[in-house]
Image (cartoon, coloured by chain):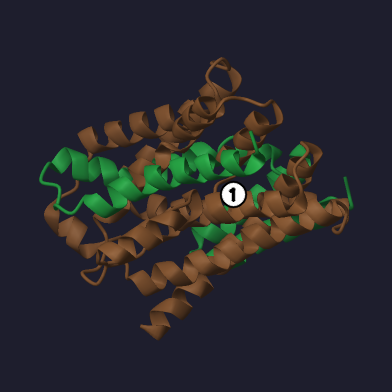
């Protein structure tokens, strides 16, 4: 139990470091939009999501309606439903309803990525360790960014912008090297993503990710359906 | 409307999106297609989020590309997540002094 928690924390360190830099930028932005340091930090602690929070602060600053707030969060964060569904297939037997109610708070892109590519099933302790350290990084970064805009020199904070993406590559490249099916999915998703970024620019970033992911994973599932033995063996 | 109300609505909406499928979906999915789809989703999401965004992640194309190359090479040789992530950042940081 305890070692699972510590393992979760260890695997969460790169996530926390990445969050620290990204949320630093969020903190600066939130204060510029008229929120206090406390409000900015409260948003980060209660939401634990990047794109959704930035859009949410925009709604608050513009004095939008609550309905608008709900719709914006739904559209931007609906990908978490897919991730939660996918992850629900990987949970250990010890993951009872109270654990699920608690741990679902911490399903972010990065935590999902690390958990879903683990070998074997996921225990509550493992997820709690990861969520705890990731949340600490996210809230601390927001607090620092909101309270002291220029704590970090520019060269450091901009170089930290690549941390999360570097971690994503570390997750997708090894299985892509070993499995043709995963390579196919990642290449299709990347090509579609480039298409949306430079050609189909009228589609917002949140929607683009949803479409790329569904198309690439759907094609992959059609062309390379997984066998039962393969699933048992994990990656 | 106070900011607190916005924050609560925002947090509750985001929580429900995550909580409902995570908590109430217990059955093992039978469909081979759906199981394959869910297995590929994380790789597809991460790939689409990383490319091309990584090339502008530091605010400078040259330092981003150098960081990306370092990350790709280290990831190819199965290095741990934190090593890949921090090495990419360090490479971008050091390149920043040259360009």
Task: Decide: is B77 above or below B28.
Answer: below
Q: Nearer the viewer, residue A226 or A68?
A: A68
Which percent across, then down, holds residue A173? Answer: 46, 52
Looking at the rendered structure, the secondary structure element under dot 1 is: helix
Is A80 left or right of B89, judged from the image as shown? Answer: left
Q: Residue furthest bottom?
A: A2
Which percent across, then down, holds residue A76? Answer: 49, 33
Residue tagged 1? A165
Q: Which chain is green?
A: B
Q: Residue, x 36% and y 46% (percent of image)?
A: A83
- Residue A7 visible, this angle: yes
Which percent across, then down, holds residue B10? Answer: 53, 40
Which percent across, then down, holds residue B57? Answer: 69, 42
Is A58 left or right of A69, judged from the image as shown? Answer: right
Q: Assign the N terminus of chain A to one quadrant of the image.
A: bottom left
Q: Residue, x 67% and y 31% (percent of image)?
A: A58
Q: Nearer the viewer, residue A194 or A75?
A: A75
Q: Residue, x 14% and y 52% (percent of image)?
A: B27
Q: Residue, x 41% and y 84% (percent of image)?
A: A3
Indicate the chain on which mark 1 is placed. Answer: A
Q: Which chain is brown?
A: A
- Residue A194 visible, this angle: no
């Amino acid at each position: 139990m305890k070692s699972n928690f510590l393992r979760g924390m260890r695997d969460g360190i790169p996530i926390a470091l990445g969050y620290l830099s990204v949320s630093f930028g969020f903190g600066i932005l939130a204060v510029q939009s008229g929120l206090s340091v406390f409000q900015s930090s409260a948003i980060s602690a209660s939401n634990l999501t990047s794109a959704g929070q930035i859009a949410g602060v925009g709604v608050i600053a513009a004095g939008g309606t609550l309905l608008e707030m709900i719709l914006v969060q739904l559209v931007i964060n609906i990908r978490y439903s897919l991730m939660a569904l996918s992850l629900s297939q990987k949970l250990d037997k010890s993951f009872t309803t109270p654990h699920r109610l608690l741990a679902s708070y911490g399903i972010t892109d990065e935590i999902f990525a690390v958990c879903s590519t683990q070998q074997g099933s996921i225990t509550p302790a493992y997820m709690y360790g990861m969520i705890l350290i990731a949340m600490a990084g996210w809230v601390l970064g927001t607090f620092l960014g909101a309270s002291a805009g220029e704590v970090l020199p520019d060269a450091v904070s901009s170089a930290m912008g690549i941390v999360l993406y570097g971690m994503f590559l570390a997750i997708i490249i090894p299985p892509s090297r070993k499995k043709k099916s995963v390579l196919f999915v990642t290449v299709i998703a990347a090509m579609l993503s480039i298409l949306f970024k430079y050609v189909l620019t009228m589609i917002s970033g949140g929607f683009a990710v949803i479409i790329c992911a569904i198309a690439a994973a759907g094609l992959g599932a059609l062309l390379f359906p997984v066998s039962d033995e393969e699933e048992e063996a994990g990656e | 409307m106070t900011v607190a109300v916005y924050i609560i609505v925002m947090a509750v909406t985001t929580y429900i999106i995550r909580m409902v499928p995570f908590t109430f979906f217990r059955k093992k999915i039978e469909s081979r297609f759906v199981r394959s789809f869910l297995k590929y989703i994380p790789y597809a999401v991460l790939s689409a989020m990383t490319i091309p965004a990584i090339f502008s992640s530091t605010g400078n194309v040259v330092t981003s590309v150098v960081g990306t190359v370092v990350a790709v090479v280290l990831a190819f040789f199965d290095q741990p997540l934190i090593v890949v992530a921090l090495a990419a950042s360090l490479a971008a940081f050091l390149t920043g002094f040259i360009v």
